[in-house]
Amino acid sequence: MTKKLRLIVLCPHFEPDMAPTGVVMTRIVHELAARGHQLHVVTSLPWYRKHQVEAGWSGALWRVEKTTWGSITRVQPFAGRTKSNLIRRAVGFVLFSYFVGLRALFAGGFWRRVDGVLAMSPPLTLGLIGWHTKLFRGGKLVFNIQDVFPDAAIETGAITNKRVIAAASWLERVSYKRSDSVVLLSDDLANNVQRKLDQKFHRRVKVIPNFVDTQAIMPMSRMTSYRRELGIDESLVVMYAGNVGFSQSLELLIETARAIPDVIVLINGEGAARKSLEMAAQGLVNVKFGDYQDVSRLSEVLATGDLHVVPLRRGLGSVSVPSKTYSILAAARPICAAIDLDTEVPRILAASNAGVCVEPDNSQAFVSAISALIADRKTLEEMGLRGRKWVEGHASPQSVAQRYEALYTR
């Protein structure tokens, strides 16, 4: 019989915050709780949708909720309305991490011993906060890396100051070395991290992919209520759903709309790049923008697209695995990815036979791929069904939770 664990979980988002990392950690926690473990989550007040604390949650530095499986402590995220101010974001991360570390001492009982800590990055600062928590509360530290930082920020040009890069790289290495296990989402990301560490630390690096809840995300008819809300008729919809940031190469979608006027291009989400994309799309009647919807509508939102796109700028495929890939496949929709070849997303699409991949930042190749895919609607539908079948067999939340559990019990 598996030992019943007491764990502290440190993460930037948790339900009802609908950030992709929040969805991931929420399900891991619920799966571990279903296996009889007690968990105490320390996270932020909900803020992801508008980059400010949502109505009904403001007015306190932290809030504590009791649950059937433990507790949730939510602290101020110190978030700004924009993601483009790097200094503002860095200060916010530091303040948020400080309060997470403070409240982690009290989670589940003041300084009461636990069996382990599960910390998630980004923000990278939660690695050292996890180590700090381990020092006072005991157990093993498992550091979950969703995006390898600072690599992603360097690749996109978000960080150019050499001193800042050196400091972030030092913090990254120290955080890995202080962890008992460092969990990456793919072999690409694991190899990236191992190259930065001495050989003696390599055994700590583990690969556990993200998962998708195939019960929560179900295939639906393409003629959704959301489509009607956006004023979209029966036209074929090429869709991007997720964070509208500068690392996603979403200009490719504007080029697609210009080149293929018969399709509707739907960019659904919010983020730092949305304003510039809206300006670039002026005069294009076949480009639509949609806002974040409640997570309860995720199946409907994804079903609205006939073909989904997963673009990442060159160099980012080896430091990030967009979790939206699994969700799209669960919704039985095909994917056209523009991402570094020979990285995880192209391998998923090849294994599932549920889409195609072209090299990143190549608008001609991207538009050609979209044109070829939409020319055969029957094949599009078959790709979507194959993707659904693949995730049902390869990305279950139960198997992922068991692998995290094993990191504490072995």
Image (cartoon, helix red, strand yellow):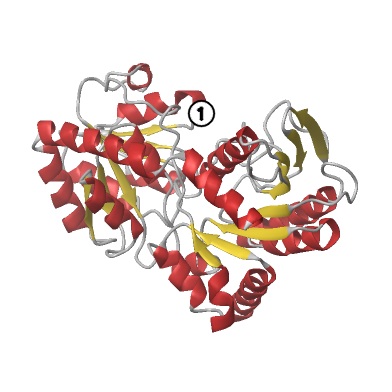
Query: Foreground: 269 or 191?
Result: 191
Q: Is residue 307 above or below residue 339?
A: above
Left or right: residue 190 compared with residue 312:
right
Above/below status of 381 relative to 276: above
**Residue ID at (17%, 57%):** 365
Characterize the local packing of mark 1: few (<14), some (14-19) or many (20 or more) Cα atoms within 10 angstroms.
some
Q: Position of residue 252 (x, y in %)?
A: 28, 51
Q: Residue at x 27, y 64 (%)?
A: 341
The number of numbered badges drawn on the structure is 1
Q: Which residue matches tag 1?
A: 295
Q: Is residue 287 visible?
A: yes
Report the residue at 47% width, 67% height from top: 190
Q: Is residue 158 visible?
A: no
Quarter holding the N terminus is: top right
Across and down, in percent, residue 339 comes to 31, 59
| Rendered location of residue 227, percent (x, y) | 33, 22
Q: State the image quarter where residue 127 is shown.
A: bottom right
In percent of the image, x 12 and y 32: which residue is there? 377
Task: Answer left or right for 88 relative to 282.
Answer: right
